[in-house]
Amino acid sequence: MTGTDPASVLAGARFLPVLTVPSAETAGPLADALAAGGARCAEVTFRTPDAEQVLKGMAAHGGLSVGAGTILTPEQAERAVAAGARFVVSPGFDEEIVAKCRELGVPVVPGIATATELMRALKAGLDTVKLFPAEPLGGLRMLRALAAPFPQVRFVPTGGIDASRLAAYLAHSVVLAVGGSWMATGDHLRRGDYEEVRRLTREAVDAVERSMT
């Protein structure tokens, strides 16, 4: 396992909170709630103007390995790492983003939705990809269909997955981690309901622990 292998960050967690955070002021209490619930890592999406400041704040917390998601360009990847990102996630496969992450020495998990995209990722030397958007693509049926001809690949299914589907994804050995946002939605953050964030995170972590016994 190398420093650029996503397993170096995600394998022990197996559950990846995917966060779209509108305000940097939310970073501290959100990181506290996730860590209190037992989360070990989190992905901050670059979908809001404050994303870099949110990432900086959560990375400074110290209790989480924080990465950057929805990275669409090499320049965004560079900014994310400068803000403290420990890993980079992209919704699709882009050779330039992969190359930039290797240059920066951080793990990258590109998104794929087809066998063709997966073969491109393998050709680029990657063996971990984000299946996105997982549920709209067919969920577990799509996961099994791709895993059969590509047994060497590890998947991070993300997109449309909720608490009721988490255990089913975790049951598959090809799944490195499952991404989801149900434990920290926009509504939770607008209300400042960090106790609910903590509770839902704890439930997800408990599901992970049950899957490993």
Image: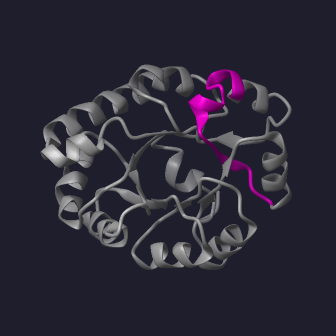
Q: How is the image coloured?
A: one colour
**Residue 114 position (above or below residue 111):** above
Q: Position of residue 168 (x, y in %)?
A: 53, 20
- Give the residue at x 57% y 69%: 106
Residue 136 lies in magenta, yes or no? yes
Q: Position of residue 209 (x, y in %)?
A: 41, 28
Residue bounds of the magenta highlight = 125-142
**Residue 118 position (above or below residue 182):** below
Residue 203 position by quadrant: top left
**Residue 168 position (above or below residue 44):** above
**Residue 7 position (above or below residue 107):** above
Q: Does residue 168 appear left or right of residue 32 in this picture? A: right
Q: Position of residue 4 (x, y in %)?
A: 62, 64
Q: Which quadrant is the N terminus positioned in?
A: bottom right
Any part of residue 94 in sight: yes
- Give the residue at x 53% y 27%: 170
- Give the residue at x 65% y 31%: 137
Q: Position of residue 93 (x, y in %)?
A: 71, 57
Any part of residue 213 in sight: no
